[in-house]
Image (spheres, coloured by chain):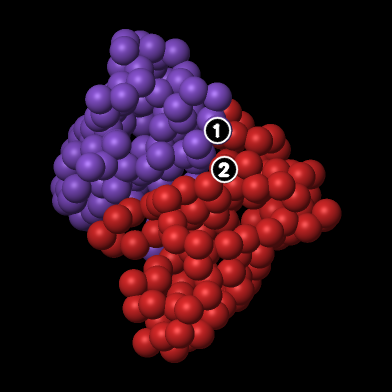
Chain colours: A purple, B red
Amino acid sequence: TQLLEQSPQFLSIQEGENLTVYCNSSSVFSSLQWYRQEPGEGPVLLVTVVTGGEVKKLKRLTFQFGDARKDSSLHITAAQTGDTGLYLCAGVKGGGADGLTFGKGTHLIIQP
Amino acid sequence: KAGVTQTPRYLIKTRGQQVTLSCSPISGHRSVSWYQQTPGQGLQFLFEYFSETQRNKGNFPGRFSGRQFSNSRSEMNVSTLELGDSALYLCASSLGWGFGTEAFFGQGTRLTVV
C-alpha cells in the first residue's frame, strides 16, 4: 500500500489551461514537499509546507497543505510547455527520522 | 556552489555481480540519503547517513549497503545483483539529519542489470 497517493498518474493538457494534482494520505505528516523531476535528472525541490491549511505561491504554482496535514494539492495556472515533468510529493513524518516518503508522482505533459 | 555529484551516470552489470555507486554532497552538507527509483514503485528510501553513521534504513535486503566518509562523500554497494535491481539510484544531500531541511538531489546513476 502506497503511503502517499498521487492523482492523476498522467495528465496531458494544452498550454494555457489550468490544472490541479493531488497528494493524499491517511497518515499525518509534519511537513510535505513537492518536487519536479525532468527526464534524466534528479528531483528538484519546489516547496515545503509545514502548517495545516498553509498556502504557498510560486509564480503560477499554488501549493496547499490540508488542515489535517494528510493531503496536499498543487495548482498550476496557465500551464506552459516548460511545466512538463514528473511532479512528486514527499512527506516527512514526525522528526524526519524515517526519511522522505514519496508518492509515485504525476506525469504532466503540456502540449503547445 | 557545486551541486550533488553522482558517479557513474550509467552502469551495466550482469546478474550476480556487485556494484558500487558514489555520491559527493554539496559542500557543507553532512547528511546523505539514497533512493531507488523504478517506474513501478517510484522513489523508495534506502538509507541515510549523517556524520559517517547510518541514521535510518528503508525496507531493502541486506544486499544493499552503504557508508559515508569523513568528508561526507558516500558510497552505496549492491551485492549479488538481481534483474529487479535495475533502477535509477538517487542520492540527496542536506545540511542536517532527517528531512526537516531541504534536500538536494543528484542526477542519479542509471543501473541496468542484464
Q: Residues within 10 Å of mark 1 (few under 14, many from 20)?
A: some
Relative to the observer, which residue lies in front, A46 or B61? B61
Relative to the observer, which residue lies in front, A54 or A100? A100
Q: In the picture provided, is B70 more to the left or to the right than B60?
A: right
Name the secondary structure under disc 1: loop
Query: Is residue A80 at least partly visible in the picture?
Result: no
Q: CA distance from mark 1 to mark 2?
A: 7 Å
Q: Position of residue A51 (x, y in %)?
A: 44, 13
Q: Are marks 1 and 2 on the same chain?
A: no
Q: Position of residue A4 (x, y in %)?
A: 29, 36
Look at the numbered discs 1 and 2 and tell me whether their residues touch, using CB distance below 8 Å. yes
Q: Position of residue B43 (x, y in %)?
A: 39, 52
Q: Residues within 10 Å of mark 2 (few under 14, many from 20)?
A: some
- Chain letter, disc 2 residue: B
Residue A76, quarter of picture: top left
Residue, x 57% and y 28% (percent of image)?
B100
Q: Is residue B31 above or below residue B75?
A: above
Query: Is residue A93 at least partly visible in the picture?
Result: yes
Residue for badge 2: B56
**Amino acid type shown at disc 1:** Ala
- Chain letter, disc 1 residue: A
Q: Is residue B81 above or below residue A96?
A: below
Residue A101, quarter of picture: top left
Q: Is residue A70 above or below residue A5?
A: above
Name the secondary structure under disc 2: strand
Residue for badge 1: A97
Residue, x 45% and y 78% (percent of image)?
B81
